[in-house]
Image: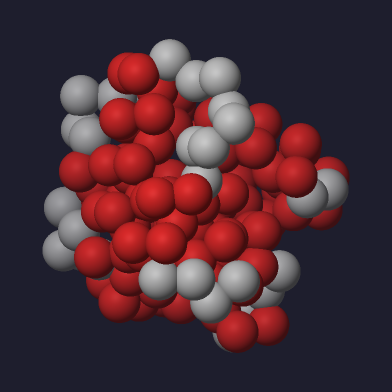
Amino acid sequence: MQMLYQWEVGRSSPAQVRSTFFIGKNVETEVETFARELFEGAVNEIERLDRLVREHAENWRLERMAAVDRNILRVALYELIRHRETPPAVVINEALEVARRFSGEDSVEFVNGVLDSIRKTLSSGNSKP
């Protein structure tokens, strides 16, 4: 989420984010690799992810959402769609923990509602992921 935030709000290129984000951070190789994959995948599929958010965030325009919340939704959605081996409940719970840490309680409820709505649609096969 932080990498997506830096990319969007800081108007950094994906290459800039990839080359600078982990400098000075003590992160396990597997964690860094997974974070980079989520970031790059979300950037590459941003239009699809944003379409899903727009469809399921009732009465909310994507542009009016807090940037942190928008990027939490994007990375969680990418993981829900592309990492089906991870149980959806785990992905959503992780997104809620990130929202608690970086946003606020109202955001937790909002993120949960949007992700749960999309999860139901994806699991029922009613929407193209």
In the displayed structure, would residue 68 be above or below residue 9?
above
Above or below for 60 versus 27: below
Position in image of residue 42 (x %, y %): 33, 57
| Residue at figure coordinates x 16%, y 53% from the top left | 125
Q: Total number of numbered labels?
A: 0
Query: Residue 67: in sight, yes or no?
Result: yes
> Relative to residue 33, is residue 27 drawn left or right?
right
20, 112: nearer the viewer: 20
Q: Quadrant where the C terminus lies?
A: bottom left
- Where residue 85 sits in the image (x, y, percent)? 20, 24
Left or right? Give the position of 22 relative to 102.
left
The answer to whether residue 127 is left or right of residue 33 is left
Residue at 32 percent of width and 18 percent of height: 30
Residue 114 visible in the displayed image: no
Residue 88 image offset from top left, x and y in percent: 37, 32
Task: Tell whether 114 sits left or right of 99.
Answer: left
Residue 110 location, quadrant: bottom right
Judging from the image, the colouring scheme is secondary structure
Residue drawn at x 78%, y 50% is: 103
Q: Position of residue 69 (x, y in %)?
A: 64, 59
Residue depicted at 29% across the width and 24% down the height: 86
Q: Compared to 22, does 113 lie above or below?
A: below
Of residue 119 and residue 21, the one placed in the foreground of this image is: 21
Foreground residue among 51 and 66: 66
